[in-house]
Image: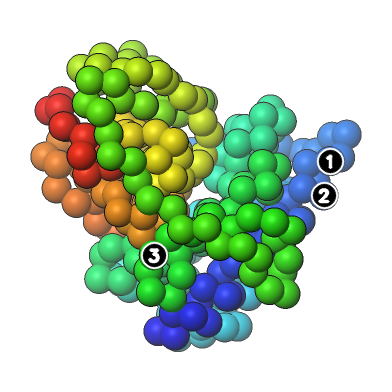
Amino acid sequence: MDYARLTDVMRRLALEAGDVIMEIYARDDFDVKAKSDDSPVTAADEAADALISAGLRAAFPDVLLVTEEQAASHTKQADTFLIVDPLDGTKEFINRRGDFTVNIAYVENGAPTRGVVYAPARGRMFYTLADGSAVEETGALDKAAPGTQEPIRVSTPDNAALMIVASKSHRDQATDDYINKYAAKDMKSAGSSLKFCLVATGEADIYPRVGRTMEWDTAAGHAVLSGAGGAVIRFDDHTPLTYGKDGYANPFFIAHAPGVELKKP
């Protein structure tokens, strides 16, 4: 894989998808449908999926592409592939809370090694460079050329005063019970894959997810966090979270800076 080209393509497609999403977000009303699993889908999900899929297939025709909106048609399994959630945080989008993202990632040998997370309503964009390191781009976010790329790095956590981030739309008692095992200085709520990015930038130390997710929800954020020195592990046995699983469903997991003294379930 030409990683420099991959970075350029993923970045540009994320920005283009963000424009499509924000055009629909600005409308007075938009249709919301239910998928077979009762999760919501909007015209923005579908339009962004079509744009990103076409762009990735044109640029990398020989690489398997997995996307949320085409999940029912994915019959192939591989340990190296592109994976996309064109609009992560659909509930945040519907409720106009802004915490939604475009996620594009490249998985190699079961691990997400490159990715981009773009939050168009927040004007924040995180991605991996060709060498795998993670940055947050600031400035105009011009599609033609990257602006200032600020390297990002996980925190050196204080285990007596941890910064914890948790889901805004999927918070439950099981999550709270686990969080209560830690000495927390403060708690943040965020939607979509932004939670991974808050750990990647050191704005949070740990993000536990005790709930259902799919690989397209997590791969891009996982890649960014890995590029910033962090890790994502299974909740049950603390082994690395892997990708290319049957059905692309994730177990519960913990995203964290390495210095966090992890608690067992």
Q: Is residue 64 above or below residue 228?
A: below
The residue tagged 2 is 23
Q: Amino acid at mark 1?
A: Ala
Image side of residue 237 versus residue 62, left or right: left
Residue 109 x %, y %:
25, 71
Q: Position of residue 131 (x, y in %)?
A: 38, 74
**Element carrying mark 1:** loop
Crowding around mark 3 (Cα neighbors within 10 Å: few <14, some 14 to 19, many 20+) is: many
Please tell me which residue is depicted at 39% across the width and 65% down the height of the picture: 133
Vertical order, 84 against 6 (above or below):
above
User: Which residue position is annotated with label 3?
Assistant: 133
Q: Counting other residues with Cα less than 10 Å from the Cα at mark 1, is it few (<14), some (14-19), or many (20 or more)? A: few
Kindly check if marks 1 and 3 are in contact, taking CB atoms under 8 A apart as contact.
no
Q: Earlier in the sequence, mark 1 or mark 3?
A: 1
Q: Secondary structure at mark 2?
A: helix
Observer-side mark, 1 or 3, equals 3
- Proximity of marks 2 and 1: CB atoms separated by less than 8 Å: yes
- The residue under the point 30% across, 54% down is 229
Q: Which mark is residue 26?
A: 1
Residue 210 position (above or below residue 133): above
Of the two numbered discs 2 and 3 on the same chain, state the one appearing first in sequence. Answer: 2
Q: How is the image coloured?
A: rainbow
Q: Residue furthest right?
A: 28
